[in-house]
Amino acid sequence: MNKILAGVLIISAILISGCVSTVNPVNPEDVIVNAGTITMKEFQEKEITVKIFNNGTEPIDSVKATSFDPFTLVSSGSLNIPARTTEGPSSASINVTIQAPGFKTDMKNSAMVISYASGKNENEGAVIRTKSVPLQTIILPDAKLQYVGFVKGLANLSEAEVTSWEIGKGQNATITFSVKNDGKTTIDKNSLNVLVDIENKEIGSNKSITIGEGMAKGGTSYTEGVVLPINKDAPNGETDVIVTLYMGNNIIDSRTIHLKVRL
């Protein structure tokens, strides 16, 4: 009788401590993955945060990323997530370090594979399950603005640029810049745009220009000049001029220079 009572007490202690694994593993449909939109320059590494929800009635353990095609998975954290509660799914976040492919890689089928342990098999071993999750990704060329600044006029584009400039009302501010491809993939002509924007719209507006040159690895564009008229009734004082490099609606690089309007 004492042996039976002792056995019951041991089993009860195990159950109370939570050390008994689940029998039925959580279905992959109950594991929800959210990483937002992942935007990177080609071949660069980045640590991203992946939020994972467990909508199952049992916990999931050793949750981690095991692959992320066509990215290279450099490393992944691992964590345990308890079962859903009466308030909804339980969640936790892992940090995953990835390396981007070339920016012309087809990203339509990009998917991250998540693995987790849940339940037990007939040999009392943990059941490992996986889930493939399509994620929204944007890969950009590794390009940058260079030699951004003010010059006297379009005839002076080869002169050394300066990042602060003083000007009178009603005059023209000339901004110069070029673009360099620091990546490994050729950037097609007419695929990049640069917006030059005077932040204070009472002083002046903006102008956009398309980069007409293709650039292979290490290639550069021509030096460009953009003329922005300063309003005749502009208030005196300072404003930022933001020069931004775009591909589509995505920002690749940005520089800020400073303009001062005198009385």
Image: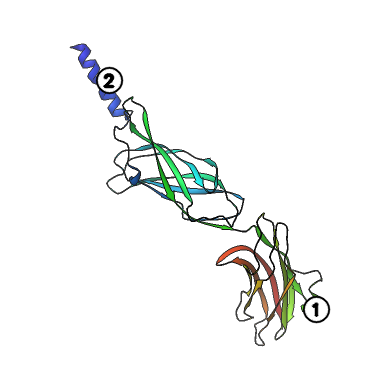
Tell whether 21 sits left or right of 204: left
Furthest toward the left, the residue is 1
**Residue drawn at 29 percent across, 35 percent down:** 24
- Which residue is rendered at x = 27% and y = 20% of the image? 10
Of callouts 2 and 1, the N-terminal one: 2
Residue 3 in the image: above or below residue 58? above
Q: Nearer the viewer, residue 20 or 261?
A: 20
The answer to whether mark 2 and mark 1 are in CB contact below 8 A is no
Q: Residue at x 68, y 82 (%)?
A: 230
Q: Is residue 106 above or below residue 153?
A: above
The answer to whether residue 127 of the structure is visible from this angle is yes
Q: Amino acid at mark 1?
A: Ala
Residue tagged 1: 155
Residue 57 position within the rendered picture, expressed as x and y whole percent measured from the top left: 29, 41
- Locate residue 74, reporting x and y percent: 56, 42
Q: Which residue is mark 2?
A: 10
**Spatial separation of the CA atoms under disc 2 and disc 1:** 89 Å
Badge 2 amino acid: Ile
Quadrant location of the N terminus in the rendered image: top left
Residue 153 visible from this viewpoint: no
- Between residue 30 and residue 235, name the one nearer to us: 30
